[in-house]
């Protein structure tokens, strides 16, 4: 089932409004974080993100997002995770001022508004239907910025995005925010393998992960249930992110929901301690130097 977005009419907006488009269930999930970044700051000032593009984009779209805004834990979670992604990305560019960052499955997020540090480069990439929506609703790419159509379930996205590769190349920052849980396990492994195979040493991949317990349970999620998308992948063990590849390492793990309230903090902390994986968190992966075949000494 497609998720219909009805735009405000040109008469209402006083300008030439785009014609209505249909987003498939997976793409329509972009409205959840967009609504939170547009309207969540006032409700949760402690994690406010001050996104200057989200509210105008939603206004132009005329989509009804009131049901998403009633799901307060998700609104908090989006703002909290945005703050963490932003901080980790900013730290990365402090260390690598001329490097490239890429937001895979970017939806209508605009991280470069916070991350433009003068010399770095930025790519926003998503499925074509989402990128056309960006063309209509968001400002054109600025200097050192570009957009790309991508299908993350297809191979060679590293090459298709013309990202640097090789031991001497500048490290790359990859963000996957609110994306991996919707992909099939094999697709997640291929996507992570591409990072492990091609990313120059020192590159980082930032992603949020659900636990395996969320798989198949999107209908129980107060926001995602409205989109008809499904959760298909979740962490069973931490090594799911690293083990099949010789170069990938987990550098750090960052909580998202623990500041929401005391009960949530207890639940999330206990879950992590008992099951050995977080219920929901941000993972920071990196890649080692090129792995070399082991030498047999006789
Ligand atoms: C929950 S939204 C998150 C959007 C954005 N990262 C954010 O946090 O605002 C999930 C996004 O993943 C994108 N996505 C899902 N599967 C994809 C695929 N195979 N290739 C490219 N993008 C994909 C969707 O189009 C959608 O924009």
Image: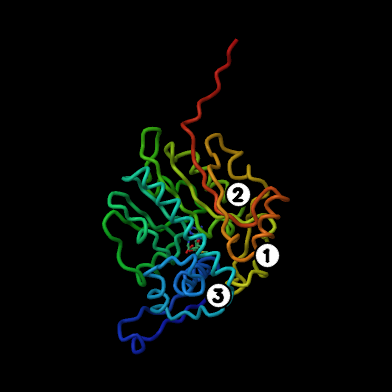
The residue singled out by tag 1 in the image is: 263
Q: Is residue 193 above or below residue 278?
A: above
Please report the residue visible at 52 percent of the width from the left and 62 percent of the height from the top. Answer: 80
Give the quarter of the figure containing the C terminus.
Answer: top right
In contact (CB < 8 Å): disc 1 and disc 3: no
Label whose residue precedes the other's in the sequence (1 or 3):
3
| Figure quadrant of the N terminus | bottom right
Q: Earlier in the sequence, mark 3 or mark 2?
A: 3
Secondary structure under the numbered disc 1 in the rendered image: helix
Check disc 2 and report its element: helix, strand or loop: helix
Q: What is the CA distance from the residue labelled 3 to the residue labelled 2?
A: 30 Å
The residue located at (36%, 78%) in the rendering is 18
Which residue is label 2 attached to? 186
**Residue 86: horizontal and vertical position, in percent?**
43, 56
**Other residues around mark 1 within 10 Å, as few (<14) / some (14–19) / many (≥20):** few
Earlier sequence position, callout 2 versus callout 1: 2
Q: Nearer the viewer, mark 1 or mark 3?
A: 1
């Amino acid at each position: 089932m497609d998720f219909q977005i009805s735009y405000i009419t040109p008469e209402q907006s006083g300008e030439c409004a785009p014609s209505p488009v249909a987003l498939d269930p997976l793409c329509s999930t972009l409205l959840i974080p967009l609504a939170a970044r547009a309207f969540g700051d006032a409700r949760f000032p402690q994690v406010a993100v001050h996104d200057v593009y989200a509210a105008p984009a939603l206004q132009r779209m005329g989509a009804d997002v009131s049901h998403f805004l009633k799901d307060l834990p998700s609104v908090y979670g989006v703002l909290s995770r945005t703050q963490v992604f932003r901080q980790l990305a900013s730290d990365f560019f402090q260390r690598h001022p001329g490097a490239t960052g890429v937001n895979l499955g970017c939806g209508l997020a605009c991280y470069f508004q916070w991350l433009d540090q003068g010399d770095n480069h930025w790519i926003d990439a998503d499925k074509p239907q989402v990128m056309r929506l960006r063309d209509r609703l968001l400002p054109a790419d600025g200097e050192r910025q570009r957009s790309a159509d991508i299908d993350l379930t297809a191979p060679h996205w590293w090459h298709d995005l013309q990202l640097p590769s090789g031991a001497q190349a500048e490290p790359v920052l990859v963000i996957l925010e609110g994306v991996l849980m919707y992909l099939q396990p094999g697709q997640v492994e291929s996507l992570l393998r591409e990072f492990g195979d091609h990313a120059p040493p020192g590159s980082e991949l930032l992603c949020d992960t659900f636990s395996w317990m969320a798989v198949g349970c999107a209908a129980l999620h107060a926001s995602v249930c409205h989109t008809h998308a499904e959760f298909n992948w979740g962490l069973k063990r931490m090594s799911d992110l690293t083990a099949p590849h010789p170069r990938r390492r987990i550098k750090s793990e960052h909580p998202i929901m623990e500041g929401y309230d005391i009960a949530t903090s207890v639940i999330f902390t206990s879950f992590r301690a008992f099951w050995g994986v977080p219920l929901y968190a941000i993972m920071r992966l990196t890649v080692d130097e090129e792995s070399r075949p082991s030498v047999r000494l006789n």
